[in-house]
Image (spheres, rainbow, N blue to C red):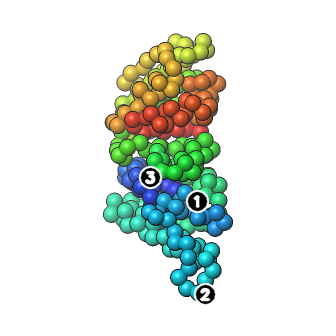
Amino acid sequence: MFERILVPYNGGESAQMALDQAILIAQRHGGIIHGLNVFDPAPYQSEPLLMDLGDGLPTSPIGPSLSNEAHLLKIAEGRAKESLEHLEQRCQEAGVRYRTQLVLGAVAAQVLEAAHQADLMVLARPAGTPKLRALVDTWVRQSPVPVWLTVGAPAEPQQVVLAYDGGIRAADALQVAVRLAQAWKLPLGLWVVREEEQVDEATLQQAQDLIHELGTDFASAQLVEGQPDQVLVSLTGSNQLLVIGTHGHGHFLGLRFGHTVDAVVQGAKGALLICP
């Protein structure tokens, strides 16, 4: 299911959490981890994927033969290679397949381009700089593949929880949730949140029918009323994975990448699987 797992990796704390989660997923699916390190040579001194390196990069060259810019770039390249070597070591110790890649260019764009060759992108909820948080937000919004967002310590979920509103993207998320529950032999919980009139008992029944058509069953199915962001946050937990779609016809799964998605990402107590 998740054969090709993309991990944007710079060796920072968030990247290491994402890698640990990706290793767990690869061990379950037999997938291969693609560790990608990207840096931009133009503004790289302020690029989050390079500046999450402790005290940052030195500001003066060591040797007279190198310009300050060339020296900093050389240091950045060396540290990027070191971070990928760490990824390789972790994957070897865990017994999972991997490949690493170091590319030059705009960080956000290069990661999204690489995502087109992946089945899943794994990130961790960022606790770093605003620029790093903005990068993760961009990847979640624009990723062509599902994004597994790790919250807290990486873990294998004991339950898959699907949030459904009847929209096109919600149907895609439903298929991903069902396939994951089947592959990992996990119970599947179904939740429909009613905030607008078009979401009702018929929406719940629609989801139940689709799940049955895919050859599986659900452990629970509920229709609840409430604020979408509050309900979504309440569905998260350390032992379960909340699966949601990124675009729908309503507020609930439309996420609208403002208040709702911010509240869910910031308030989540467990991992999210966000499907495009």
Position of residue 248 measured from the top left corner of the image (x, y, whole percent): 62, 28
- Comparing 32 with 79, the one in front is 79
Q: Residue, x 49% and y 17% (percent of image)? A: 226
Name the kind of residue labelled 3 in the image.
Ser
Q: Label 1 is placed on what type of residue? A: Glu
The crowding category of the residue bearing disc 2, from other C-alpha atoms within 10 Å (few below 14, some 14 to 19, many at least 20), is few
Residue 200: image quadrant is top right
Q: Bin the neighbour count of mark 3 within 10 Å (Cα to Cα): few under 14, some 14-19, many 20 and up.
A: many
Q: How many marks?
A: 3
| Residue 108 placement (x, y as % from top left) | 62, 54
x, y percent for residue 183: 41, 40
Residue 170 at least partly seen: no
Q: Is label 1 in contact with label 3 (beta carbons under 8 Å)?
A: no
N-terminal-most mark, 2 or 1: 1
Badge 1 is on which residue? Answer: 47
Front-most of 151 and 262?
Answer: 262
SS at mark 3 in the image? helix
Numbered tag placed on residue 14 in the rendering: 3
Task: Give the label on residue 65, or none.
Answer: 2
> Mark 1 falls on what kind of element?
loop
Please tell me which residue is depicted at 53% across the width and 59% down the height of the picture.
49
State whether residue 232 appears in this view: yes
The span from disc 3 to disc 2 (Cα, nearest Å) is 36 Å
Q: Circles 3 and 2: CB distance less than 8 Å?
A: no
For marks 1 and 3 on the same chain, the one whose residue lies earlier in the sequence: 3
* Residue for point 52% across, 51% down: 129
Query: Which callout, 3 or 2, points at the residue further toward the start of the chain?
Result: 3
Q: What residue type is disc 2 on?
A: Ser
